[in-house]
Structure formats: structure tokens, C-alpha cells
Amino acid sequence: MVTAAGRAALSEALRWYGQLLNQALDGWSRAEIDALQEGISRFVSDIHTALQLHDTTEAAP
């Protein structure tokens, strides 16, 4: 269970990161943001696949 203080801390962290991303992406075109999103999605998917392979691959002696 998350306490009221915990919820407040999470809310503040989300607000801070949102502002940071808005600053970092200021001046980026829609196409640039879309390309970044596509690249991050591919990276996350490939990490997920690699972790699944790791979980199902037995270490060689």
C-alpha cells in the first residue's frame, strides 16, 4: 500500500520528469520525436527478447 506521502513523492517525481522531457525535447519536430519513440520501443523490445532468451538458455559447461 502506498501512503499519502508516497503518492505525493511519486506525483512530484512524475511532474519533475515531465518538465525535464519537455525541456529536452523543446525544438524537436514531430518526426524527430516519433523517430525517438520508435527507436526506444525497438530497444525495449530487443531487451525483452534478450532477457527471455537468457531465461530459457542453459549455460554451457
Image: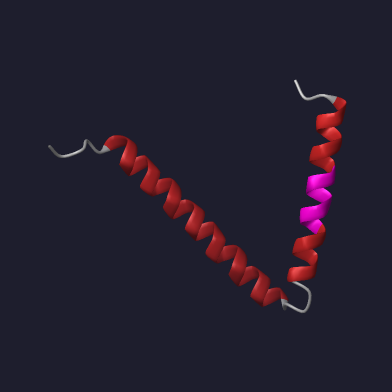
Identify the residue at horizontal 66%, vertical 76% (top origin): 31
In the picture as drawn, the residue positioned furthest to the top comes out as: 1
Vertical order, 6 against 20 (above or below): above
Identify the residue at horizontal 20%, vertical 38% (top origin): 59
> Image quadrant for the N terminus?
top right
Say if the magenta span includes residue 1: no
State the colouring used for the structure image. secondary structure
Identify the residue at horizontal 15%, vertical 39% (top origin): 60
Q: Quadrant of residue 53?
A: top left
Q: Quadrant of residue 36?
A: bottom right
4 relative to 55 in the view: left or right: right
Q: Position of residue 48 (x, y in %)?
A: 44, 46
Identify the residue at horizontal 49%, vertical 59% (top origin): 42
54 relative to 48 in the view: left or right: left
Q: Main secondary structure of the magenta part?
A: helix
Please tell me how many numbered marks the rendered image carries: 0
* Magenta stretch in the rendered image: 12-18
Q: Position of residue 17 (x, y in %)?
A: 76, 55
In the picture as drawn, the residue positioned furthest to the left comes out as: 61
Which one is in front, 44 or 12? 12
47 relative to 22 in the view: left or right: left
Q: Position of residue 61 (x, y in %)?
A: 12, 37
Q: Position of residue 43 (x, y in %)?
A: 48, 58
